[in-house]
Amino acid sequence: MSEFTKTQAIVHPHYDWTPDLLVKDRFVLDRDFFTAPMLTDADRISIIDNYPPIRGQIRKDNNLKPLQYPLSGGFRPLDILDSEIIKCFT
């Protein structure tokens, strides 16, 4: 078994699959999702500025922030192990 290196742990998503013909016919996937032109920066800013703020929202909820780092440290090795196991069986 080769020595574990940092580059082996990196997982890049890829989307090289082609949908089934039944899916293509049903959902018409051969056209663009966004057909309208994009808003200009000035229009976008004016819409955001005119939108009323959410009532009662005073602060952000930081209750889960202290758990975020330890959980990612615990689950990331499991993600790497899972990807290595899948590579072994494919």
Image (cartoon, rainbow, N blue to C red):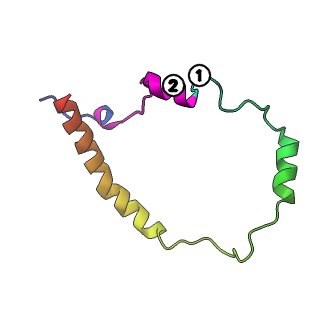
Relative side of 77 to 16, left or right: left
User: Toward the viewer: 43 or 9?
Assistant: 43
Q: Secondary structure at mark 2?
A: helix
Task: Name the residue beneath numbered marker 1.
Answer: 30
Q: CA distance from mark 1 to mark 2?
A: 8 Å
Dot 1 surroundings within 10 Å: few (below 14), some, or many (20 or more)? few
User: Residue 82: horizontal and vertical position, in percent?
Assistant: 24, 43
Helix, strand, or loop for circle 1? loop
| Quadrant in the picture for the C terminus | top left
Disc 1 versus disc 2: nearer the observer: 2
Where residue 64 sits in the image (x, y, percent)? Answer: 47, 69
Q: Which residue is mark 2?
A: 24
Taking 2 as reference, is 44 left or right?
A: right
The residue lying toward the viewer, choosing from 15 and 75, is 15
Q: Quadrant of residue 83?
A: top left
Residue range in magenta is 8-27
State the mark number for residue 43.
Answer: none
Q: Residues within 10 Å of mark 2 (few under 14, many from 20)?
A: few
Q: Position of residue 31 (x, y in %)?
A: 64, 24
- Amino acid carrying mark 2 in the image: Lys
Q: Nearer the viewer, residue 41 or 28?
A: 28
Residue drawn at x 48%, y 67% as measured from the top left: 65
**Residue 7 versus residue 78 in the image, above or below:** above
